[in-house]
């Protein structure tokens, strides 16, 4: 497929010989973004390599956007520690980064007597995990909180601390802060191989990069990156697909809380929950597959998700679908996170973050810095940390359309202003593709999915994206 | 925030939301009937609604006695609205509808609230996007609807693909094919899931006449593409076929642009997808009226114009009568192969009617007897083979206004 030059952003330039970075972060998912921030805050010279055209191109683009407490994490696990640490840090930094927190509660809903019997065990596990705010509810009490719950509800467990956040603005804010501290971000830059001889010579699709330490945050390709670096990975990624349906904002009044099922061994199950953007999310499925790239949606599965939602909250029946998507979770051959350090190779791998990555990312970043301490490098943290904030996209807080002089509304469904689009395109981390613009602004994420705004966005974004919205001017072939 | 929010309190009679054919026609009629303070809001920079980007369909023959194409029709509406003394405010997006006729709006100036004695919703319709159709596969760039394609072409001089697969066989599908052919794109095929084209022959033969394959009984089972569409797998007469293409153009399956109504107490009618209205175009909330394609999705611009004019007249009569109508509603129900009946309410004390007929459409092709029952008594019947996307009209009998219930039956 040929694309006229004026429509496409130029192929990424090869890199000139550069400095030796202290740390190369492989992967611009939520974990990589958090790690880049943490190391930049520690005073390290950081480079982040992302093979996609934009950050969050892999597993991190599709999740349920819940900031978990860890109530159901395996007791004593690293995952539990890091979810708790990550959540705590998110709560402490979110104001300064302008990140939302939607104070939902989660209700673990039991629909049969057998499930109801399991709730006590889940509550006990939560208590063992040090999570407060747990309460066993009768069906009537649960309906007091979510009146629309279906009649066959048996009982529920309330988890007060489970909240909803903006899953894309959070990592964007982390990495924006890293960039403000001097970190470099290279997109369309795939790690091909690496040689370690005291420090790392990394061969990438954009040339050679040198770094003292490598932190593998490559998500779905975590094991592959270890291999490319000449190390035998300790794990094997087994992609787990999750399909989601996003319901129209009219659904939100029926779902004021996160509705969780009683989980099984493999998955937390299908969640029905509010989003920070005012919709209701239904998903994910948990489907094992070998393909690490394709995450297709399937009509029958989407329909089953809709049926599921209407079964537990009957008022959701018939509410229009706004969006559908699917993502791959980087599950591995074992359930725990696969986190390890190889001091002899100055390589830290944060692998197998199959779920809870959004909640644990900041905790994982701190953990990586702790592991890094053993490598003996000393950095001087910056004297002052530049103030960084990202635009708010959550409906619970003021949006740009509510302020004067926004230019005009470009996306009417999500009320995205021209000023917001232009600001995103000119930000320190501009979107590298249409998905990136959507995640940064909500443009074309609404109920018409771009019926009205795609053409205007094609013009506004000409020359910016690896895959442009327009293939060329009309009338030319 | 506090500085930007303004509440503008005037003695506005009517606030019209949407400046397409139905909204402008209603405004013109209201003014003609002596209603003085009428504000017309549109979120786009100019009036015309969907007609602005329709490059092929002719508009205006019946209402203005001459033919306009695309944006020229919108400019005519602009002139008519100005000459009639309508308070036109373009670049105004309505954010929410209050139960008491207070509407929240954002524009370049920021947020404001506008109020009026009555609100008329004329927000039109749009084609259903990929997500709402639950289409399978990847989600790359290059999947869009006719309306979006026409906006690429009409407003920006751009093309989103060169070799799209076109889905659908409604009237708008021909417009999609023609837009492609005249702007540097060659559709690889037009596919229709059903056994025949939804438009009448000879229009159903149109793609074939243009040398583009038209495949019936064909639906998408997979869309492939990492960043841009690369191929689509179809099930054609039960056999899988993969065709290379760089886009998917979804045509038709119009749905009312009724998002503003969804969160309100009156909601939307499950059949039409638009607000439930009575024979005057009045909603369940009697401060609200609606006209045009928001009522039941797509009809032509001319139909929407006439409907706007009729509802405008009924609305003027309603204002003259004074207080909002408060009487009970008579529900109009229907059997399942019938997709919608509009109006889906009647009111005994409605005043001037805007609709003489029930507009009926079918969900899928069906053969049988369609009848109208008033309190269980059949007052109209016709048998035939009924096709989806074809309008059926059943006269609204006077006796229906005295009834407890009205039902459109299918046997």
Image: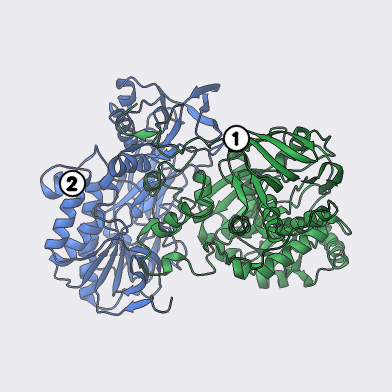
Q: Residues within 10 Å of mark 1 (few under 14, many from 20)?
A: many
The Cα atoms of the two marked residues, 2 and 1, are separated by 50 Å
Which chain: blue?
Answer: B
Q: Residues within 10 Å of mark 2 (few under 14, many from 20)?
A: some
Task: Left or right? Give the position of B52 relative to B230.
Answer: left
Mark 2 touches mark 1? (CB < 8 Å): no
Task: Left or right? Give the position of B250 relative to B138.
Answer: left
Disc 2 with disc 1 on a shared chain: no
> In the image, which disc is placed on residue B72?
2
Say above or below: B335 vs B115.
above
Q: Name the chain letter of the residue that bears numbered label 2.
A: B
- In front of the other: A417 or B221: A417
Task: Left or right? Give the position of A257 relative to B13.
Answer: right
Q: Colour of chain A?
A: green
> In the image, which disc is placed on residue A206?
1
Quarter containing the N terminus of chain B: bottom left
The image shows residue A258 at horizontal and vertical percentages of 67, 62
The image shows residue A426 at horizontal and vertical percentages of 46, 53
Say above or below: A467 vs B242.
below
């Amino acid at each position: 497929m040929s694309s006229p030059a004026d429509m496409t952003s130029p192929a990424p330039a090869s890199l000139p010989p550069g400095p030796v970075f202290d740390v190369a972060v492989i992967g611009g998912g939520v974990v990589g973004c958090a790690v880049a921030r943490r190391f930049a805050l520690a005073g390290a010279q950081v480079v982040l390599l992302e093979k996609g055209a934009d950050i969050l191109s892999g597993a991190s683009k599709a999740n349920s956007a819940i900031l978990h407490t860890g109530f159901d994490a395996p007791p004593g696990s690293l995952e539990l520690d890091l979810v708790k640490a990550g959540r705590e840090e998110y709560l402490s930094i979110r104001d300064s980064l302008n990140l939302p927190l939607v104070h939902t509660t989660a209700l673990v809903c039991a629909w049969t007597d057998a499930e109801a019997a399991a709730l006590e065990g889940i509550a006990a596990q939560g208590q063992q995990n040090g999570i407060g705010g747990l309460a066993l509810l009768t069906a009537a009490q649960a309906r007091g909180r979510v009146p629309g719950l279906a009649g066959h509800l048996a009982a529920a467990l309330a988890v007060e601390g489970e909240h909803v956040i903006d899953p894309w603005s959070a990592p964007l804010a982390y990495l924006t802060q890293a960039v403000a501290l001097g970190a470099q971000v290279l997109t369309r830059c795939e790690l091909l191989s690496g040689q370690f001889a005291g420090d790392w010579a990394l061969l990438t699709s954009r040339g050679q990069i040198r770094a003292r330490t490598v932190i593998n945050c490559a998500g779905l390709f975590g094991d592959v990156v270890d291999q490319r670096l000449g190390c035998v990975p300790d794990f094997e990624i087994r992609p787990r697909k999750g399909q989601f349906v996003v319901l129209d904002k009219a659904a939100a009044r029926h779902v004021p809380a996160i509705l969780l099922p009683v989980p099984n061994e493999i998955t937390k199950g299908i969640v029905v929950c509010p989003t920070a953007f005012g919709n209701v999310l239904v998903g994910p499925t948990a489907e094992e597959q070998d393909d690490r790239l394709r995450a297709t949606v399937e009509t029958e599965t989407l329909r089953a998700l809709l049926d599921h939602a209407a079964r537990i909250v009957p008022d959701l029946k018939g509410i229009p679908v706004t969006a559908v998507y699917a993502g791959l979770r980087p599950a591995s051959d074992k359930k725990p996170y696969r986190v390890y350090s190889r001091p002899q190779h100055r390589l830290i791998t944060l692998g197998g973050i199959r779920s809870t990555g959004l909640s644990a990312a900041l905790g994982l970043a701190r953990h990586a810095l702790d592991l890094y301490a053993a490598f003996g490098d000393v950095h001087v943290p910056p004297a002052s940390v530049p103030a960084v904030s990202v635009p708010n996209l959550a409906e619970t807080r003021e949006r740009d359309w509510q302020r004067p002089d926004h230019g005009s509304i470009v996306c009417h469904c999500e009320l995205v202003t021209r000023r917001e689009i232009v600001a995103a395109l000119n930000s320190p981390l501009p979107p590298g593709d249409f998905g990136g613009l959507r995640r940064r602004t909500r443009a074309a994420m609404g109920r018409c999915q771009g019926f009205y705004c795609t053409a205007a966005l094609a013009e506004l974004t000409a020359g910016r994206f690896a895959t442009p919205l327009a293939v060329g001017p009309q009338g030319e072939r | 925030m506090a500085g930007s929010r303004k509440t503008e309190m005037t003695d506005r009679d009517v606030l019209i939301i949407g400046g397409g054919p139905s909204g402008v026609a209603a405004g013109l009629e209201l003014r003609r009937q002596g209603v003085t303070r009428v504000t017309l809001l549109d979120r786009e920079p100019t009036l015309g609604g969907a007609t602005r980007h329709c490059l092929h369909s002719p508009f205006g023959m019946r209402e203005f006695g001459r033919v306009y194409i695309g944006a020229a029709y919108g400019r005519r509406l602009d002139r008519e609205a100005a000459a009639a003394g309508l308070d036109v405010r373009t670049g105004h997006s309505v954010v929410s509808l209050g139960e008491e006729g207070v509407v929240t709006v954002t524009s370049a100036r920021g947020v404001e609230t506008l109020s009026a004695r009555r609100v008329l919703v004329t927000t039109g319709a749009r084609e259903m996007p990929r997500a709402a159709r639950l289409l399978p596969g990847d989600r790359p760039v290059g999947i869009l609807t006719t309306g979006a394609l026409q906006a690429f072409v009409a407003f920006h001089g751009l093309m989103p693909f060169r070799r799209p697969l076109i889905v659908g066989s409604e009237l708008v599908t021909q417009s999609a094919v023609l837009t492609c052919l005249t702007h540097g794109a060659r559709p690889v095929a037009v596919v229709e899931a059903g056994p025949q084209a939804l438009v009448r022959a000879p229009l159903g033969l149109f793609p074939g006449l243009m040398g583009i394959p038209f495949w019936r009984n064909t639906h998408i089972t997979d869309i492939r593409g990492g960043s841009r569409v690369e191929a689509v797998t179809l099930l054609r007469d039960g056999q899988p076929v993969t065709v290379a293409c760089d886009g998917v153009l979804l045509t038709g399956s119009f749905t009312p642009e009724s998002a503003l109504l969804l969160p309100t107490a009156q909601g939307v009618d499950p059949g039409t997808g638009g607000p439930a209205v009575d024979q005057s175009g009045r909603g369940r909330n009697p401060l609200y009226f609606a006209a045009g394609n928001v009522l039941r999705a797509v009809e032509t611009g001319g139909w929407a114009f006439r409907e706007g004019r009729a509802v405008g007249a009924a609305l003027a009569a309603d204002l003259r009568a004074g207080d909002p109508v408060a009487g009970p509603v008579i529900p109009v129900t229907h059997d399942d192969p019938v997709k919608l009946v509009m109006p889906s309410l009647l009111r005994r004390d409605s005043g001037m009617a805007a609709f003489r007929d029930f507009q009926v459409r079918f969900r899928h092709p069906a053969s049988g007897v369609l009848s109208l029952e008033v309190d269980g008594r059949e007052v109209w019947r016709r048998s035939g083979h009924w096709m989806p996307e074809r309008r059926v009209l059943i006269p609204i009998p006077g006796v229906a206004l005295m009834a407890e219930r009205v039902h459109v039956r299918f046997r």
